[in-house]
Image (cartoon, grey):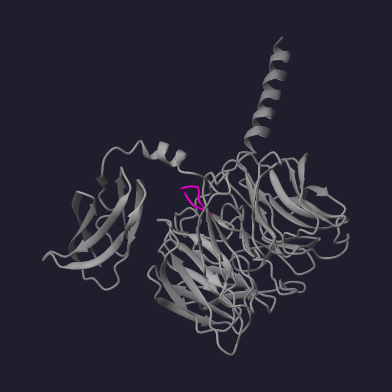
C-alpha cells in the first residue's frame, strides 16, 4: 500500500511539473517602459505575447493616412500613445519620419530624420521614456518623450534589425548590414562592442535580431546561413547550435528554452535548451528545401506554452501549432498565393494575429486554428508584427512600398464593440484624481485618474503663483482609468500643482520636483 501511495504521488508530481512548466508569463524587465507594448515583438524574449485580450471582431475604429507608409512599429507607451517609423525612399524629394500618435490616431509629434532612407528597424521605449529607433541610413536615434533629439549616432552601415533590444543594464542591441551585432551605450550611443560569427547576421535585405534569456545574462542571435549563437554580455561565445537558421527573432520561453525555424537534416521548428542542446524538432517538408536558408520568420507562444509558426509547404502557406512538447495541435491553411513572413503575435487568449507580405489580408486565427476574421489590406504590405494595447485595441502598420507617396490607411486600429468596455467601466462610479507617483520625483512621474463618463478631459500643471506651466492633456476620452507621464524638461526644483478638469469636475493635487 505504501509503495502504491508513493507511485501515485510520483505520478502526480510529474504531472504537476509537466503542466506548470508550460505556464508562460511576463518576465520583469525594469529597463523597458512598463507599458502594453514597449518594443517590437513585445518583450526582450521575442514572445510576441500580449497580456491583454485582442479584438475578436474586425471592427475598425479608425485609420490614419501617414503618407509615407509605416514600416516599423507600432510600439505603445504607458498611457497608450503609439510610435511608428516610415518607409519612403525617393532621394530627390522625400525625407522619412518617426511619429508619436495619441490612441485616437491624431499625431502627437513628428520627428524629421532628414534622411531619404526609411526608419525600418524595430525599436523600443526605455524605462526613462527614451525612444530608440534606427534607419537604413545607418543612424540610431534617441529621442525623449516629447520627440526631442537626445543623441544621434552614425554607424556607417544600413541597420535592418527587425528588433532592437535592451539588456538589464540598459545597453542597446541591434544588427546591421555589415553582418555585426552591435551593443551600444544608452546615454550616447557609443559602441561597447560589435561581433560577427561565421558569415554574419545579414542576408538579402534583412538581418536576424537578438533576444535575451529570462535572467538577461545570455544573448541569442541567428546568423545568415549557419548556426544559432549564444553570447555572453561582452559578446563572447557561450555555445552554438549547428543548423541553417532563418533570418528571425529567436523566441525564448520562461524556462529559457529557445525556439527557432531552420534546417538541420530537414526544415522545422527547433526547441533548444539553455545549454545549447536540442530539446526537440518539429520537422516539415518545406517549399524552401532542406538545405537552404529560410525567409524571415518568428514564432509566438501562448500562456500555456503552445507554439505557433508559419510554414510554406508544397506551395501553400500554413500556420501550424504544436504544444510545449512538440505534439501537433492543428494547422490553418491560408488561401492559395498568400505569403506571410512577419513575426507572429498572440493575445492573452492565444488568438494569433498576422498580416500578408503581399498585401492581401490581415488575419485573426483562434487558439483552436479557426479563422475569426480577416481584413482586406488592398495591396498594403505588412512588414511588422502589430501591437495590442491594454484596452484590447490592435494597431497595424502598413505600406505600399518605398517608391510611393500619398499612401492611405497606413495605420489601422481594430477593437471590439464597446459592450465589454462599458461593462468594465461601469465599475468606475466617480471621478478620481490620484496622487502622482513617485512624489517627490526627479525626472519622471505618473499621474493616474478615472472618469465615470465620456467627455473632454484636461490635465494641466501650474506653479505656486498659479501660472500655467504645461498642458499634459486636453481631448475627448472614453470613461475609464488613465495614466499620464509628466516629464518636465526645464523646470526648477519646487512645488507645483496639477489640475484635472472634466465636465463639472475639477480636482487639484500637489507634486514636488527635486533635481
On the picture, is 366 further left or further right than 314? left
The image quadrant of residue 468 is bottom left
User: Relative to 31, does residue 70 appear above or below in the rendering?
Assistant: below
The residue lying at 25 percent from left, 55 percent from top is 439
Q: Position of residue 293 (x, y in %)?
A: 81, 65
Outermost top residue: 1
Q: Position of residue 234 (x, y in %)?
A: 60, 68
The residue lying at 69 percent from left, 57 percent from top is 298
The residue lying at 43 percent from left, 41 percent from top is 421
Can residue 451 be seen in this snapshot?
yes
Outermost bottom residue: 92
Q: Quadrant of the N terminus?
A: top right
Name the residue nearer the viewer: 230 or 339: 339
- Residue 492 lies in magenta, yes or no? no
Q: How many marks?
A: 0
The image quadrant of residue 383 is bottom right
Q: What secondary structure do most residues of the magenta stretch adopt? A: loop
- Residue 391 lies in magenta, yes or no? yes
Can residue 438 be seen in this snapshot?
no
Q: Position of residue 31 (x, y in %)?
A: 47, 60
* Magenta segment boundaries in residue numbering: 388-393
Q: Quadrant of the C terminus?
A: bottom left
On the picture, is 479 further left or further right than 17? left
Outermost left residue: 465
Name the residue nearer the viewer: 283 or 205: 205
Q: Position of residue 93 (x, y in %)?
A: 55, 88
Amino acid at each position: 500500500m505504501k509503495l502504491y501511495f508513493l507511485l501515485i504521488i510520483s505520478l502526480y508530481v510529474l504531472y504537476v511539473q509537466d503542466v506548470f512548466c508550460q505556464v508562460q508569463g511576463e518576465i520583469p524587465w525594469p529597463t523597458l517602459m512598463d507599458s502594453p507594448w514597449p518594443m517590437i515583438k513585445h518583450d526582450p524574449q521575442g514572445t510576441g505575447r500580449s497580456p491583454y485580450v485582442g479584438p475578436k471582431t474586425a471592427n475598425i475604429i479608425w485609420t490614419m493616412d501617414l503618407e509615407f507608409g509605416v514600416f516599423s512599429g507600432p510600439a505603445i507607451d504607458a498611457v497608450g500613445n503609439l510610435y511608428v517609423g516610415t518607409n519612403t525612399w525617393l532621394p530627390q524629394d522625400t525625407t522619412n519620419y518617426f511619429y508619436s500618435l495619441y490612441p485616437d490616431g491624431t499625431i502627437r509629434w513628428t520627428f524629421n530624420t532628414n534622411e531619404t532612407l526609411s526608419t525600418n528597424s524595430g525599436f523600443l521605449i526605455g524605462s526613462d521614456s527614451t525612444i530608440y529607433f534606427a534607419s537604413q541610413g545607418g543612424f540610431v536615434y534617441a529621442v525623449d518623450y516629447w520627440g526631442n533629439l537626445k543623441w544621434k549616432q552614425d554607424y556607417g552601415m544600413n541597420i535592418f534589425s527587425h528588433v532592437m533590444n535592451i539588456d538589464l543594464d540598459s545597453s542597446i542591441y541591434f544588427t546591421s548590414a555589415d553582418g555585426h551585432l552591435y551593443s551600444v551605450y544608452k546615454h550616447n550611443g557609443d559602441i561597447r562592442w560589435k561581433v560577427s560569427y561565421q558569415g554574419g547576421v545579414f542576408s538579402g535585405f534583412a538581418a536576424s535580431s537578438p533576444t535575451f534569456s529570462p535572467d538577461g545574462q545570455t544573448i541569442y542571435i541567428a546568423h545568415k546561413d549557419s548556426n544559432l549563437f549564444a553570447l555572453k554580455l561582452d559578446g563572447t561565445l557561450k555555445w552554438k547550435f549547428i543548423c541553417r537558421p532563418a533570418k528571425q527573432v529567436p523566441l525564448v520561453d520562461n524556462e529559457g528554452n529557445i525556439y527557432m525555424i531552420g534546417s538541420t537534416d530537414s526544415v522545422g521548428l527547433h526547441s533548444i535548451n539553455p545549454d545549447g542542446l536540442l530539446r526537440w524538432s518539429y520537422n516539415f517538408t518545406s517549399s524552401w528545401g532542406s538545405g537552404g536558408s529560410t525567409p524571415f520568420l518568428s514564432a509566438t507562444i501562448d500562456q500555456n506554452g503552445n507554439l505557433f509558426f508559419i510554414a510554406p509547404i508544397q506551395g501553400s502557406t500554413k500556420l501550424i501549432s504544436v504544444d510545449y512538447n512538440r505534439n501537433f495541435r492543428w494547422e490553418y491553411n491560408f488561401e492559395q498565393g498568400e505569403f506571410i513572413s512577419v513575426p507572429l503575435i498572440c493575445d492573452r487568449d492565444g488568438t494569433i494575429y498576422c498580416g500578408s507580405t503581399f498585401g492581401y489580408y490581415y488575419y485573426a486565427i483562434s487558439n483552436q486554428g479557426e479563422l475569426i476574421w480577416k481584413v482586406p489590406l488592398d495591396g498594403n504590405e505588412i512588414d511588422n508584427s502589430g501591437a495590442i494595447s491594454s484596452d484590447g485595441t490592435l494597431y497595424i502598420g502598413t505600406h505600399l512600398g518605398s517608391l510611393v507617396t500619398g499612401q492611405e490607411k497606413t495605420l489601422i486600429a481594430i477593437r471590439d464593440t464597446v459592450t465589454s468596455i462599458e461593462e468594465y467601466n461601469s465599475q468606475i462610479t466617480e471621478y478620481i484624481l490620484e496622487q502622482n507617483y513617485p512624489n517627490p520625483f526627479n525626472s519622471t512621474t505618473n499621474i493616474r485618474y478615472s472618469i465615470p463618463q465620456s467627455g473632454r478631459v484636461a490635465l494641466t500643471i501650474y506653479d505656486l503663483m498659479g501660472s500655467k506651466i504645461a498642458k499634459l492633456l486636453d481631448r475627448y476620452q472614453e470613461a475609464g482609468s488613465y495614466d499620464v507621464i509628466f516629464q518636465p524638461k526645464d523646470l526648477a526644483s519646487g512645488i507645483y500643482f496639477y489640475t484635472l478638469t472634466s465636465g463639472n469636475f475639477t480636482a487639484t493635487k500637489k507634486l514636488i520636483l527635486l533635481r
